Amino acid sequence: MTPKWVSSATLPHPPPDLRTATTLSTDALRKTLPNPPPSSKASSQPDIQTVGSVQMAPALRLTAGKSLLLQLSENAARLSVGNPDVADVVLINQREIYLLGKKPGHTNLLVWTAKGNTTLRDISVGTDTDALFAKLSEYVPGVENLRVDSVADSLVLSGRVSDGMKVQRLMALTEAFNGNKKVINLLRVHGTQQVMLEVKVAEVSKTLLDELGVDVNLTRTFGSTSVNLLSQLLSAGSTALTTSRANGMSTVTLTAEMKKGLVKVLAEPTITAISGQEGSFLAGGKIYIPVPQANTNGSTTITLEEKEFGVGLRFLPTVLEDGLIHLRVTPEVSELSQVGTLVKGIGNQSSLLPSITTRRASTTVQLRDGESFAIGGLVKSNVTQTIKAFPILGELPILGALFRSTAFQTEKSELLFVITPRLAKILPPNYALPTDAYIQPTRHEYFLHGQMEGPAPIATPIADPVPTPTPSIEPRNVQTVTP
């Protein structure tokens, strides 16, 4: 007798092709399933028809590669699985079904009983999340409300961790367990995850310049012969001493100059960045340098290239466990050089381009909140000596000083960075601003005294409160009358 098929109106999905169910690996299931109509011969199985609507049974969750034994409340006559590539089902006897998860996915199971009752059960196959949860709890302890779920062939992690390093470890372990497949990160990091960097840049530069030059003009006449000695060895000094005779035939000019310079630079930039994100800071300016570029038609186009200078800082913080901060920092101090670069452009035209002197340091350290480290040793010492002299005469002792000029220049500078990372905290309500100490002067103070700021108010000392004397109670004399 050919089995009757249930109408698709009574089922949530059309009935599966029973030829799909014949792909199962057991002979017992093949014997329980009839051949599909209409070309099949009559089967010895009884005619089973669904009575009433299809009942939904609780869903089953299987683990890929693991099996499950399902107990039935009624005798099963036949069964069918929607996708045998996801799960394998075998009817062992009328009350037990063997299920095996093959790969992550979703399918359903239809079970017909001898009484005509039909149940539909959803089946989901996923990764072994229990084993992964045990491994994660073992290697990364201290995670609050850790949960591992399987969605198709992906894993979902959720919970609360104390720092970003635990997130990286959990993600690495989960990806290794899941075969480098997709892992959805729903972990929440509580606590402070922003780093405020305080940088102090201190630089001291000293310059010393000594110059001494002589200009000699001597004229002598021997009969009809006149001899003139002229040596122009003057320096760029602003102080000059000139001696000449009344007849104007002998003139000696002496120039000398000494310069001393001292420059102090102090910058205290402060910047805040999220853990794992780079932050940068620049206090300076920009210049544009012309750069020639050749076109395809053979002509040349001048473009402007932007260059930055000043006090700059780049850092990449990462908050680790127990308040430890992993910090990669690159401070930099650059300035425009007083000596430019001479270049020749189009048509042999010479141009003086500005040049930038840069001092930069880069390092990676691990510090705790409030700890500081210094980057020093950036010392520059330049000594320049120049002597211009008349040949032979400039080498004579004592008198040779009249025929030569000397210039001695020395430059010394030292740069120091002091860097302090701090975990960002809530700013107190009574924080101070740089403009709080400014007091606007009165018109009298501004015009008559030339004061740009008013005088600071004199703080009135607060007197200690006078303690209130406590009244003392004196005992009264009580007279006792004896009857």
Image (cartoon, helix red, strand yellow):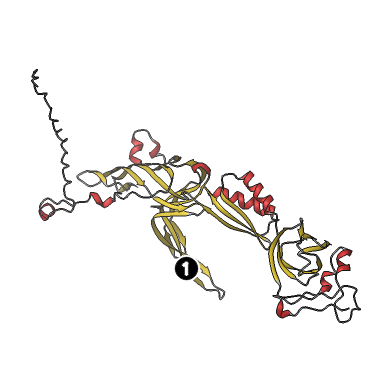
Q: Residue furthest bottom?
A: 38
Q: Position of residue 45 (x, y in %)?
A: 88, 72
Q: Residue furthest top?
A: 482
Q: Position of residue 351 (x, y in %)?
A: 43, 62
User: Is residue 149 shown to the viewer in this render?
Assistant: yes
Taking depth in this image into account, of 87 and 313 the one nearest to the observer is: 87
Query: At numbered mark 1, what does the secondary structure look like: helix, strand or loop?
Result: strand
The image position of residue 154, as x and y in percent, is: 66, 60
Q: Is residue 458 above or below residue 299?
A: above
Locate residue 475: give its quadrant.
Answer: top left
Q: Determine the residue positioned at 78% across, 66% down.
A: 85
| Residue nearest the observer in this picture, 76 or 227 | 76
Left or right: residue 70 compared with residue 221: right
Asked if 272 appears above or below 382 in the picture, the reply is: below
Q: Quadrant of the N terminus?
A: bottom right
Q: How many marks?
A: 1
Q: Circle 1 sits on which residue?
A: 303
- The type of residue carrying mark 1 is Thr
In the displayed structure, would residue 101 be above or below residue 40?
above
